[in-house]
Amino acid sequence: MKAAKNAARARGERTRQAILKTAVDIASVEGLEGLTIGRLAAKLSLSKSGLFAHFGSKEDLQLATVDAARAIFIREVIRPTFEAARGLPCLWTLCDVWLAYVQRGVFRGGCFFAAAAAEFDSRPGPVRDRVAEIMREWLSTLRRAIVDAQQALQLANDIDPAQLAFEINSLEMGANWAFQLHGDKQAFKRARDSILERLQRGSTELGSTLLPSLKGTRNRKKR
């Protein structure tokens, strides 16, 4: 009996993950508001009642989709930094990998959270709050890496970590916007060059040896 329950639970979890994978794909292009139980049921050839067994409401589905997108973001952007040295190398890796994740189309609609933030920034509620929390997590991750670099004497101490994190995030969001709206394929190179130049200006003599050369990024081949 217990084995049968465990097997049923495992099947249910696999179904839920398959649903969320499709939900993230749809929402990244059509927005979270375009994500409905009926839309998903048709896409997955499932019954609405079957989907309601996993998600009791549209809002529950939206929140679960946001968290599924967060898990993908962590896998694609955060985990690759685990192998980078603490401080400036980690900070640069975070910036470089974020741009690469948008550039290679991990989400069909570009940065999932940039799109979700634009969609819900003026709409109070649990979905907006969750998206805002995740965006704060990203800014905090950048800020922590900046502080680590300062403590390691790789970045100047007079740099405001919150300000630099804001600048980096703004350049990344700008690259995402330019690519998605205008198809500007040079946007990622421009953002990389701008972020690297900003880090080089703020780095100490030790820190400058840990960054790639600006010339190197300009000569980088398209991924």
Image: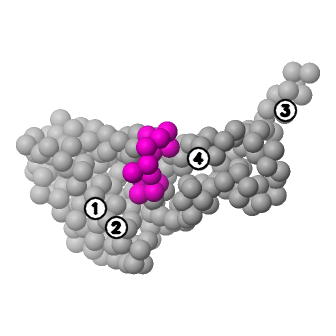
Q: Report crowding for label 1: few under 14, some 14 to 19, many 20 or more residues within 10 A (C-alpha).
A: many
Q: Residue at x 19, y 55 (%)?
A: 199
Q: Residue at x 19, y 43 (%)?
A: 161
Q: Secondary structure at mark 1?
A: helix
Q: Which residues are magenta?
A: 116-129
Residue 143 screen position, x and y as percent: 26, 42
Q: CA distance from mark 1 to mark 4?
A: 27 Å
Q: Amino acid at mark 1?
A: Leu
Mark 2 or mark 3: whose residue is earlier in sequence: 3
- The circle on residue 60 is none
Discs 1, 2 touching: Cβ within 8 Å: yes
Q: Is residue 214 magenta?
A: no
Q: Which residue is mark 3?
A: 7
Is most of the magenta stretch helix, strand or loop? Answer: helix
Q: Amino acid at mark 2?
A: Ala
Q: CA distance from mark 2 to mark 3?
A: 45 Å
Q: Which residue is mark 4?
A: 62
Is 163 left or right of 41, judged from the image as shown?
left
Q: Which residue is mark 2?
A: 175
Q: If the image is split into quadrants, where does the C terminus sit?
A: bottom left
